[in-house]
Image: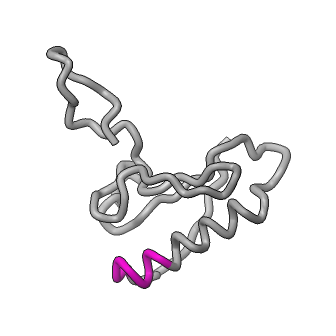
């Protein structure tokens, strides 16, 4: 998904979204960079990791079941379809 344009109005090569996938509050998954592209989410680990983020403000509430299930489904898909090897699963809460 290209959102930025260069000075001539052509799409720039910068990807605006660094995550591989995003999940909305309704549980729908949105493709950021997808599986086939290196992310820009974790300095030093972009080549050997995928990043899935939930869209929303979770300072006072947890993501609901639909969001958590969509994230679990994406992880399952990555393991089966993309031939990723699960070394560790880490969750970060960014405030």
Kindly give the residue lying farthest to the top in the view shown.
7
15 over 39 or under it: above or below = above
Residue appearing at x 35%, y 77% in the figure: 82
Please tell me whether the stretch drawn in magenta is mainly helix, strand or loop.
helix
Front residue of 90 and 62? 62
Above or below, 18 relative to 46: above
Region in magenta: 77-84
The image quadrant where one finds the N terminus is top left
Q: Position of residue 17 (x, y in %)?
A: 41, 42
Q: For the point 20% across and 37% down, which residue is it?
A: 13
Q: Is residue 89 left or right of residue 78?
A: right
**Is 81 within the magenta?**
yes
Q: How many marks?
A: 0
**Where is residue 63, by image quadrant?**
bottom right
Task: Identify the residue at image location x=20%, y=18%.
Answer: 9
- Estimate the x, y position of residue 72 in percent, counting from the top left: 61, 73
Q: Is residue 49 left or right of residue 2?
A: right
- As drawn, 17 above or below 3: below
Q: Quadrant of the C terminus?
A: top right
Which residue corresponds to the image point at 40% horizontal and 46% vertical from the top-left?
A: 18
């Amino acid at each position: 998904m290209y959102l930025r344009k260069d000075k001539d109005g052509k799409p720039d090569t910068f990807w605006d979204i660094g995550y591989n996938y995003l999940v909305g509050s309704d549980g729908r998954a949105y493709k950021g960079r997808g599986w086939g592209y290196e992310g820009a989410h974790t300095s030093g680990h972009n080549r050997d990791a995928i990043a899935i983020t939930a869209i929303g403000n979770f300072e006072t509430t947890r993501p609901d079941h639909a969001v958590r299930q969509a994230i679990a489904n994406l992880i399952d898909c990555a393991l089966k379809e993309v031939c990723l090897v699960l070394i560790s699963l880490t969750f970060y809460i960014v405030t």
